[in-house]
Amino acid sequence: MKKILKFVAAGISALLLFSTGCNNGASNNIGGKPGEESTGEESTGEKDAAIDSYSGSHNGVSTENTVDGKTNVITIKGDKLSSDDWTFIDFSLKEYGDKKVKLNFSCNMKVVNDGEKTERLMWQVNLSDYPVIAEHSFTKGSSDWTSLTGSWEGNLSSDNVFYLSTHETQKENLTIYIADFKLKISYSEISSTKLSWLEESVPSLKETYADIFDSFGIACEYRPWNHDPELASETVRKGLTKHADSITMGNEFKPDGIFSISWGQSKPSIASEKFTASNGKTIDVPVLNGFTQMDNILADCKKAGLKMRGHVLVWHSQTPEAFFAEDYNPQKSDAKITNLVDKETMTARQEWYIKTVLEHVAAWEKANGYGEGNHLVWAWDVVNEAMADDAGKVYSGNGQNWLRGSTSDTKDKAPDKGGSRWYQIYGNEEFILNAFRFANAYAPADVKLCYNDYNEYMDYDGNHGSWKTSAILHIIDELKNDAGITLDGKTFKARIDVMGMQSHVGPSWPGAGGYENALKRYLAAGVDVHVTEFDISATSQNQAASSYKEYFNMLKKYGKNYSGSHKITNVTVWGISSEDSWISNNGSQYPLLFNRSGSNYYTNSAFDAVIAAAE
């Protein structure tokens, strides 16, 4: 069953369809005839449309003939939406897939907010960086009519929608009225010559680099919320298998993904069994709900013949705030958690988490034919991003200024502002040493353990100077020379095998030369290097191709044929397609080797450049 919203435009008659088969507040298709998809054959065009009428109701959406003298007003009752609805209302942009689009949007909104908190309502497009086209915050009570306007320009795929987000709202408290809705869409075709990444004539990245690096990797997600599945798709797995030996999950193996606390729930459920740590502390532990998805991911990797870098065990970000709080129930005052646990409790929790995750993976591997010398998860990022961007060279005491949380830019800040709950509890690097001690105790001896960080090539003085490379080298030295600790008669000694250079680089900074200087220092420190998250913030496809070739010409010198005892053993690019990259910037940047249209992936000139660099 479909409800029809009519668009009226100068010289154009278009239709907006409400599809009752979706699980959003309401879903509509802009353009085309009722029940049909637009062919999208025009190379350029423009539509200037306004909602004219709507009849009926759907998932909390209905029409009020008149509200405060305004006619044809769309009404959305938040308490009628389901808990899974991530939009109050959304409009399909399917017709504009593979097109460069400019949206000009305006509407009037009135909100009745029956809750206590101010609600931020955002009109967005579901791209990887979730651009906000227009927004307004509505306080408790009935608001005046508010005019919202905004514009956005970028490249779209066929699964994009324009939507009013329910994110971080208490939607059950809201009644939303929308009047004078206008969405002007200007579009043009994106010109390119496209070859499917599965095309027989397209070279394989992993085979091309097999004599240069031990493995070639591609990061991916399992089932991204805003486009077709990646690893969960058999077709995408074929492409990953063709081009990669190894994958890295973008989000699913991070602590947030493993805890998998229900939406809107701040405190996790507590398991019935307690855990007694090696320091003698007995603690309650939460239920980890992410293991079912983890097992599905591991099973799909096995099907595809892929291996994986585990990412990540200890991180200041994407870790539930509850993990650091007494009773797993954080009490906040501005950026601070006022009931942080003590060091002994946090050490017990850290040991429990690392032990539980690593032993779960080991049990899965044993049950599925893996073992010593043949691990599906062959490396782990044990600690991620623990050094500050504004790191200095004071490594101990009250004046230390190297760790995230110890510097002027990071001290006493929330994780999303650059702070670290780990540092706020420990006040030093003890949690890093412990993480590698526990990882060494509970991971198989032949699984590589890695410290991973970004801006890992920053070492310069000045007003905004940073000695981040030196800070990372300092922690590597501490880890390599760790004497260990004895807990309950058992010695825990740190092990570090790899420095993970994230490598979110730009065309001119740090430049291949600046990057190479840092790389050589890490290799000289006695660890191998994994290039863990490579992408380039290029502003044109030609610039991307040129930069990729420059960087890969440099990287290959430090692979298998490098004369030093430590080498680059893995290079992983951070994502499949530029459209879905975290730095796509609405399609204005070209960071990766493939482009996506719907569920299909195509090589671009950066891919060609990486292939050429291997020759």
Image: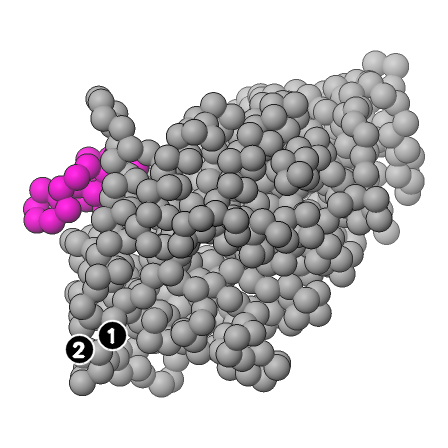
User: Compared to 89, does 7 lie above or below?
Assistant: above
> Earlier along the polypeptide chain: callout 1 or callout 2?
2
Element carrying mark 1:
strand
Q: Amino acid at mark 1?
A: Phe
Q: Nearer the viewer, residue 513 or 315?
A: 513
Pinpoint residue 160: horizontal percent, then vertical percent.
70, 39
- Identified at 63% across, 48% down, the residue is 209
Q: Residue tagged by mark 2?
A: 486
> Counting other residues with Cα less than 10 Å from the Cα at mark 1, is it few (<14), some (14-19), or many (20 or more)?
many
User: Compared to 585, does 305 lie above or below?
Assistant: below
Q: Nearer the viewer, residue 302 or 18?
A: 302
Q: Which mark is residue 205?
A: none
- Identified at 82% across, 18% down, the residue is 45
Q: Which quarter of the figure has residue 515? A: top left
Q: Residue tagged by mark 1?
A: 492
Q: Are marks 1 and 2 in contact (CB under 8 Å)?
A: yes
Pinpoint residue 14: horizontal percent, then vertical percent.
85, 27
* Residue placed furthest toward the front: 563
Q: Amino acid at mark 2?
A: Thr
Our reading of the magenta stretch's main secondary structure is loop
Q: Nearer the viewer, residue 190 or 196?
A: 196
What span is in magenta? 389-411
Is residue 7 something that shows in the picture? yes
Marks 1/2: CA distance? 6 Å
Residue 407: in magenta span: yes
Element carrying mark 2:
strand
* Residue placed furthest toward the top: 10
